[in-house]
Amino acid sequence: MEPLLMAGFQCNELNEVLARLHFQLHYIDKYDKNKIPSNCALCLIDLRTDNIINEINYLVKELDPRIHIIVLINKAQLDNSEITTFIAQFAWDFCTSPIDPERLEKCLGHGLGLSKLKQQYQTPQPELPCNDPEHPITQSETMQQLYRQIERVAPTDIPVLIRGESGTGKELVATQLHQSSSRKDGPFITVNCGAMAAGLIHSDLFGHEKGAFTGATSNRKGKIALADGGTLFLDEIGDLPAELQVNLLRFLQEGLFDSVGGCITQSANVRILSATHVDLENAIDQGRFRLDLYYRLNGITINTPRLKERRDDIIGLANQFIRVYSNEYGLVAKPLSQSACHALLNYPWPGNVRELINRVRRAVVLCDTQQITAQNLELANIEKKRHIALSLKTLKDNAEKQALQQAILIADGQVELAASYLDISRATFYRLMDKHHIQLI
Ligand SMILES: Nc1ncnc2c1ncn2[C@@H]1O[C@H](COP(=O)(O)OP(=O)(O)OP(=O)(O)O)[C@@H](O)[C@H]1O
């Protein structure tokens, strides 16, 4: 019997079909590595009966990528962008209701065969791969300090406010805090407070009951409930609408919350991490952010430095991303040319690490020479500027040397007179002669 993971199943209508196909069914509702048979090749997810996409999203991200996912949906759900995005991102195949057993059988058969081949020929990702984009590069002293701070703060349950410009790695820091905490086996759930309208974010955060509003066709857990026993990361907290700041404050003070349309107050054991790239103090002064919420969130502040403040990491990061993307696109990882290194080190990086990733990824794809050049990184102008700057310096030096030589000639070798022609002191004249290796004849 082949093990088959079953997620989101509320009805047993398919059990008979699946049993006939000699599958042994393993139901999973919350991700638990120990519940997943080691030889499991397939996961069948039923998204038809309930809106469980949040839970399922969390679950599939944790699955071994070699396990093939097959999704069951209703035809009408093909108009639901949340569902279609999920399918596009994670599914190997999908079947629509009414489920045709023959079609499902073929789908499972193909999925099983292919997944087994993959398991045979593809090695799983090692735990800490050197080509993992999320594996942080921390060569610079600034980053080493930051990671020492993370190690100290992580084991506590103190709320942490992570501050820094966009693309500096705030979410990565939040992930590291979770991974280094005693909650690491629990969920890590992210809410982007800036990405959604107030109405949607309310239900996303606190959940809703069936019938709470038009479109609420079923009960749905919010992210706070999903993060129970783990960590909730509130990204772009400065954008949280005012009315939700009150509800969040209540949860932070009492650990209690109400879902939209719910009449029973719920509780959850969650560690809160938040991040912002805006000036929260300014938002407080302008009345856009509650001071009491700020104090609750800001148990400890961690600042993520701008990339230009951690230049010692730039080449290490670039090399890591070259390995990652060459590997991803099946290309040979090429080294950086000297001009590329200069350009990387001299560019101001307004978009921080995210911009570095974008430039390197493009360069990996576009590079048709032996080495990745500044041009591949679209940083050739920086290199040109460096050359212009260099030649300007050379020009200045040459002009200075010529002026000294002419003055000596006209003054017939009398240094004091020559210095007076150039309006500089005798001492400066000698120093410059020394610099340009000029000798009196
Ligand atoms: N030290 C690092 N080592 C490796 N990768 C890093 C490092 N810092 C950041 N990154 C990568 O840079 C990208 C941007 O990081 P992240 O999303 O954490 O930034 P952010 O500050 O949260 O950005 P935003 O404010 O725009 O959400 C991610 O892909 C992350 O993995």
Image: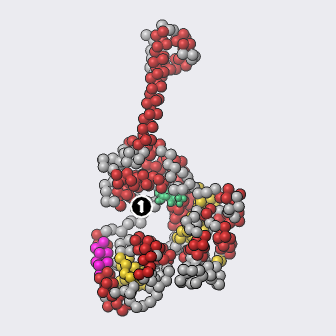
| Residue 133: x %, y % from top left | 43, 60
Query: Splitting the image into 4 quarters, where does residue 374 fall?
Result: top left
Is 40 in front, or is 286? 286
Is 37 in front, or is 62? 62
Asked if one can make out residue 178 in the rendered structure from this viewpoint, the answer is yes
Which quarter of the image is occupied by the C terminus? top left
The reply to whether the residue tagged 1 has its Cβ within 8 angstroms of ligand 1 is no
Give, as a single range, the part of the protein colored magenta. 109-118
Point 33% across, 47% down: residue:
371
Q: Secondary structure at mark 1?
A: loop
Please tell me whether residue 217 belongs to the stretch shown in magenta: no
Is 236 in front, or is 270? 236
Point 65% across, 62% down: residue:
298
The residue beneath circle 1 is 132
| Residue 167: x %, y % from top left | 51, 56
Query: As shown in the figure, which amino acid type bears the numbered disc 1?
Result: Asp
Please tell me whether residue 115 belongs to the stretch shown in magenta: yes
On screen, residue 408 above or below 196: above
Point 71% across, 61% down: residue:
287
| Residue 219: x %, y % from top left | 55, 83
